Amino acid sequence: MSKTQDREKAILDALNQRKKMSIDEAIALLSISLSSARRLFIEMENSGKVVRTHGGIHLVSAKGSEYSFEVLESRNITAKRQIAASAAEILNDEDVVYFDSGTTLLQVAIAVKARLQNKTLHRIKVITNSFANLEVLQDSCPVILIGGEYHASRRAFAGYPSEKFVQSFIYKKAFLGADGLDLNEGFMTTDTDTAKLNEVVIKRSDTSYVLLDSSKFGLRSFVSYASVSEIKAIITDNGLSEDNLVQCARANLEILVAKTGE
């Protein structure tokens, strides 16, 4: 193993015992500098192994109880904005669309609002489970916020009432998020209620897209909500390796790579 891999293993071994670690503890454990510890924490977070908090890190929870909209909102923000801009361009006038919750979908809402304001998109209707999306779009187009059990950490609604609600509509397009993509298991999330809600939406949609940045490729999460065959395409950034692209092609999964600089 490389030096970085050795350090990551030592960190993960320690986290399996104590669940949380401060940056000072990592410095002492590995005998490294502050800058090296910070860089290591960032790399481990970007690869989905840990979540950074103020002054430290903790393990990703298998059940998603540690999900935090606020923590994740600024992670990989450039990639999320590029993905969002490309997703917004897929929309056509008078589309009825479903927007999933999550920080990437929030950026989609922001990009769609810009298109509506500059008159390159007209008369769309949005159905969403995300309170954050509602806050962005409420003064730009009709928005239907579905009800259900409120998940404060996700700023979104899910659960049985939500599933019944979304069955009332037929969607021209659905834009969904994911916490990971395993080509065998499919698109994955940490939350079972969100997974079930996405399953229902996909069945009611003419076309479904999943938006995820390249750091989530190969990551396995708690529950799968769709196989690769159920999704029209994924929209991602330009960070995919050649091996990732080959594997997706073999799985007949269409890849839409966001343009840089958008």
Image (tube, rainbow, N blue to C red):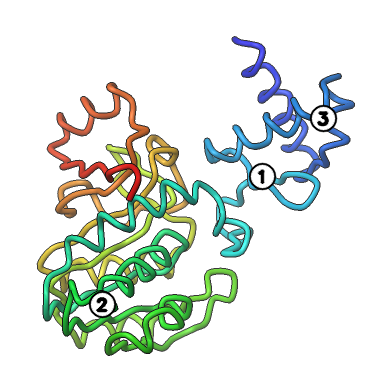
The amino acid on which the numbered mark 2 sits, given as a three-letter code, is Leu
Q: Decide which of 17, 244 is in the foreground and name it.
A: 244
Q: Are marks 3 and 1 in contact (CB under 8 Å)?
A: no
Residue designated by label 2: 116
Q: Which mark is residue 59?
A: 1
Between discs 3 and 1, the one toward the N terminus: 3
Q: Decide which of 144, 85 is in the foreground and name it.
A: 85
State the residue at coordinates (32%, 53%). Answer: 211
Image quadrant in which you'd find residue 93: bottom left
Residue designated by label 3: 34
Circle nearer the viewer, 2 or 3: 2
State the residue at coordinates (24%, 71%). Answer: 201
Q: How far across and how far down the image is residue 71, in percent?
A: 62, 58
* Left or right relative to 3: residue 187: left
Between discs 1 and 2, the one toward the N terminus: 1
Q: Is residue 163 above or below residue 190?
A: below
Q: Which mark is residue 198?
A: none
Q: Is residue 233 above or below residue 171?
A: above
State the residue at coordinates (66%, 25%). Answer: 8
